[in-house]
Image: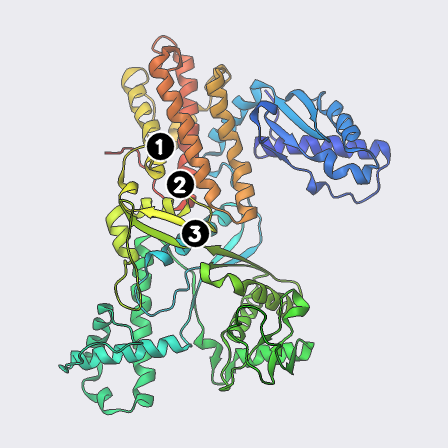
C-alpha cells in the first residue's frame, strides 16, 4: 500500500511528492535560492481522460529553472515515473504534467476517509477571520432576499472553520441612520393606535406592515399616555430604541428558523456615542496620515454619483488606494456620511484583531466595494484585507410564476414564510446551489419535489440510501454490523477495500478522494456553493452505481456468497455516507438516515 502518513489526504500526498521532485531538481541544477514552490499545485484535470491529477509545476517554475516549460516538464516527469504511487506520467501541451495513480492509491484513499471520519478534509491552524453577513436594516422581518446572504454567510463561516480558521460571525446593526427614525415614527403611529386612536391610512414614507403593531402595544403597556404628550424630539429616542430592540428580536427569531447564529451584534450607533466617537477618531487618524483633505469633487461623468456635491468638503483620498474617485465624509448638514461610519466600523474590526475580513453584501452594493477596500488599506496601513462577496437577487417563484415582494408597502414574502413552507434544509441548500453572484430562481413548488431535479432531496436521499444499504446488510448477512457510526467505521476499517476494482467503483473512490482538495479550494475562494455542487455529483455517482447493481448483479452492494467483497463495498458506502454528512453539515443541512 502507498504510504500516505506524511500527508492528510491523497492530493496533498501527491503534491508533496511533486514538490520533492522539484526540490531535488533545483538542488541538482543549482536553481536560485528562495524559489516559491507554493505556486505548484496538484488538482483534478479538466478532462478525466488525461489522468487522475495534473500539476502546473513546469509552467510556474520554468523561469527560475531557466528552461523551457516543456523541457522542465519532461525532467520532472522522469522523476515522478520512479514513484511507486504513480502508474503513468504524461507531458501535455506547453508543459502540463498529467498523472495516473496506481489503483491501490484509491483503496488507501478510502481508508483515509474511514480513518479520519468526521474530520476527513479538516484543516487545523488557520488565521482569525471576521465574516459579517445579513446586517439587514432593523426595520422589519427578514424577507427572502435577505435569506440568501444569511445562508451564504453562515455556510462560508462554517467552511472557513472547517478549513482551520478562527471565525467570528458578525451582524452590523444599522441603527444610526434616517431609516430607524422612519421606523420610530411608524411605531409611534401603532402606539397611538394601541391607545385606541383611529390613525387611518399609514402615510407614504412610513412602514405600513402589521409587524409594528406589537411594538405599538408594548409601548402602550410600558408608557401609557405619557409618550403621546411629548414632542417628537422627546419621544423619538425612546420609541426608536424599543422598535429596534423588538425588530432585532424578530430578526434573530427569523435567523434561528434557518439555524443561523452570530457571535457579535455590532451597533452602528455605538460608533458615534457621546464621549466615544469612533468616527471622529478615525477621521483624525486618517488626517494624521495625510489621507484626508478639504477639496471639491469633480462633476460626475455619465450617471450621477449619489454622494457628489459641488462644494468644498472633507474628502478621503480613496484614489490613492485604488478607488476611482475620492469620497466625502461629512454631509452638507454636518452629519457623517454612511461611508465615514463604515470606515470607522472596519477599523474597529482590525483593532479587534481581524486582519482578514469578509463582508457579504446585497446586489445593490456592488459600486461600494472599491471605496471600502481602499478604506481598509488606509486604516490598516495595508495590513488588513477585505473581501466583499456579493449575493445576487432571489427571484421567488411558485410553479414558475413570480411572487411579488415590496417591503415598503408591507406586501412581501417573509423569510419565515418560505422556511415554514418548504423547510429549513431546502432553503439552505437551494440558496447555495448557485454561485453567489448569479441571480437565483427559487421555485417553492420545485423544491418540494422528490426527484433528481430537486438537488437537496437527491443529496439527502443519497445519505438515507446508504443507511438503507446498512440495514439490508444487517438483515441479510451481517447481524453484527454496528448501528453506531463510530463503531461501524471501526468494524469496516479492516475491509479488503483493494477488491474495489470495477471502473464505476474506482470513479466513486476518486470522487471521495477529491473532497479535501475541493474544500481547500472552496475555502480559499470563499465559495461554499462548490460544496453543494460536489455533493450533488457524489450523490449522482452513488445513485448511478446502485441503479447499475439492479441490472448487473455483480455490482450490487450485497453479494450473498462473498462476504469480503460485501464488506469492502459497505466500507465504500460508509465513505459516501461520511462525506455526504460532512458536506451537508458545513452547509447547515441535515443528513437523514431515512426519508419518507
Q: Earlier in the sequence, mark 2 or mark 3?
A: 3
Question: Foreground: 230 or 433?
Answer: 433
Q: Is residue 301 above or below residue 116?
A: below
Residue 572 screen position, x and y as percent: 43, 24
Residue at 68%, 22% (x, y): give it. Answer: 89
Q: Is residue 549 above or below residue 378?
A: above
The 10 Å Cα crowd at callout 2, few under 14, some 14 to 19, many 20 or more, is many
Q: Which residue is mark 2?
A: 584
- The residue positioned farthest toward the right in the image shown: 30
Q: Secondary structure at mark 3?
A: helix
Q: Which residue is mark 3?
A: 152
Q: Is residue 505 above or below residue 307?
A: above
| Residue 241 seen in the figure | no
Q: Quadrant of the N terminus?
A: top right
Q: Which residue is mark 1?
A: 463
Question: Foreground: 74 or 345?
Answer: 74
Marks 1 and 2 close (CB-CB < 8 Å): yes
Residue at 39%, 37% (x, y): give it. Answer: 581
Amino acid at each position: 500500500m502507498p504510504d500516505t502518513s506524511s500527508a492528510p489526504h491523497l492530493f496533498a500526498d501527491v503534491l508533496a511528492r511533486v514538490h520533492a521532485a522539484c526540490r531535488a531538481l533545483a538542488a541538482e541544477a543549482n536553481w536560485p535560492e528562495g524559489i516559491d514552490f507554493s505556486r505548484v499545485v496538484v488538482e483534478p484535470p479538466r478532462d478525466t481522460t488525461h489522468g487522475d491529477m495534473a500539476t502546473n509545476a513546469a509552467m510556474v517554475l520554468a523561469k527560475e529553472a531557466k528552461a523551457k516549460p516543456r523541457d522542465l516538464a519532461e525532467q520532472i516527469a522522469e522523476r515522478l515515473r520512479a514513484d511507486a504511487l504513480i502508474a503513468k506520467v504524461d507531458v501535455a501541451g506547453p508543459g502540463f504534467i498529467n498523472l495516473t495513480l496506481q489503483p491501490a492509491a484509491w483503496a488507501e484513499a478510502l481508508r483515509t476517509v474511514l480513518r479520519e471520519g468526521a474530520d476527513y478534509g479538516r484543516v487545523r491552524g488557520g488565521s482569525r477571520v471576521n465574516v459579517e453577513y445579513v446586517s439587514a436594516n432593523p426595520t422589519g422581518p427578514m424577507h427572502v432576499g435577505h435569506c440568501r446572504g444569511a445562508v451564504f454567510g453562515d455556510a462560508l463561516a462554517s467552511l472557513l472553520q472547517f478549513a482551520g480558521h478562527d471565525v467570528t460571525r458578525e451582524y452590523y446593526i444599522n441603527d444610526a441612520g434616517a431609516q430607524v427614525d422612519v421606523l420610530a415614527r411608524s411605531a409611534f403611529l401603532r402606539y397611538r393606535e394601541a391607545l385606541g386612536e383611529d390613525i387611518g391610512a399609514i402615510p407614504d414614507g412610513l412602514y405600513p406592515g402589521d409587524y409594528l403593531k406589537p411594538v405599538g402595544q408594548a409601548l402602550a403597556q410600558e408608557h401609557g399616555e405619557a409618550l403621546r404628550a411629548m414632542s417628537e424630539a422627546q419621544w423619538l429616542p425612546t420609541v426608536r430604541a424599543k422598535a429596534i430592540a423588538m425588530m432585532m428580536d424578530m430578526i434573530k427569531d427569523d435567523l434561528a428558523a434557518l439555524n443561523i447564529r452570530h457571535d457579535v451584534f455590532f451597533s452602528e450607533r455605538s460608533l458615534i456615542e457621546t464621549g466615544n466617537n469612533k468616527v471622529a477618531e478615525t477621521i483624525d487618524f486618517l488626517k494624521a496620515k495625510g489621507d484626508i483633505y478639504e477639496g471639491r469633487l469633480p462633476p460626475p461623468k455619465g450617471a450621477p454619483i449619489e454622494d457628489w456635491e459641488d462644494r468644498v468638503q472633507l474628502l478621503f483620498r480613496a484614489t490613492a488606494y485604488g478607488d476611482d474617485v475620492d469620497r466625502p465624509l461629512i454631509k452638507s448638514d454636518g452629519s457623517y456620511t454612511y461611508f465615514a461610519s463604515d470606515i470607522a466600523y472596519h477599523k474597529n474590526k482590525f483593532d479587534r484583531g481581524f486582519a482578514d475580513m469578509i463582508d457579504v453584501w446585497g446586489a445593490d452594493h456592488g459600486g461600494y466595494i472599491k471605496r471600502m477596500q481602499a478604506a481598509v488599506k488606509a486604516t490598516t496601513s495595508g495590513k488588513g484585507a477585505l473581501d466583499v462577496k456579493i449575493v445576487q437577487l432571489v427571484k421567488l417563484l411558485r410553479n414558475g410564476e413570480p411572487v411579488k415582494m415590496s417591503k415598503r408597502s408591507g406586501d412581501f414574502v417573509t423569510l419565515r414564510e418560505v422556511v415554514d413552507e418548504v423547510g429549513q434544509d431546502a432553503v439552505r441548500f437551494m440558496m447555495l446551489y448557485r454561485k453567489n453572484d448569479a441571480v437565483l430562481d427559487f421555485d417553492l413548488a420545485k423544491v418540494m419535489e422528490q426527484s433528481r431535479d430537486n438537488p437537496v432531496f437527491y443529496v439527502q436521499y443519497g445519505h438515507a440510501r446508504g443507511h438503507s444499504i446498512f440495514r439490508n446488510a444487517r438483515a441479510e448477512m451481517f447481524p453484527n454490523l454496528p448501528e453506531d457510526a463510530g463503531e461501524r467505521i471501526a468494524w469496516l476499517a479492516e475491509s479488503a477495500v483493494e477488491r474495489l476494482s470495477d471502473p464505476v467503483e474506482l470513479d466513486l473512490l476518486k470522487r471521495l478522494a477529491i473532497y479535501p482538495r475541493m474544500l481547500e479550494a472552496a475555502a480559499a475562494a470563499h465559495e461554499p456553493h462548490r460544496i453543494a455542487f460536489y455533493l450533488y455529483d457524489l450523490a449522482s455517482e452513488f445513485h448511478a452505481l446502485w441503479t447499475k447493481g439492479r441490472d448487473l448483479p455483480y455490482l450490487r452492494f450485497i453479494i450473498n456468497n462473498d462476504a469480503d467483497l460485501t464488506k469492502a463495498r459497505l466500507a465504500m458506502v460508509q465513505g459516501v455516507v461520511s462525506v455526504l454528512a460532512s458536506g451537508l453539515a458545513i452547509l447547515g443541512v441535515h443528513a437523514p438516515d431515512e426519508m419518507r
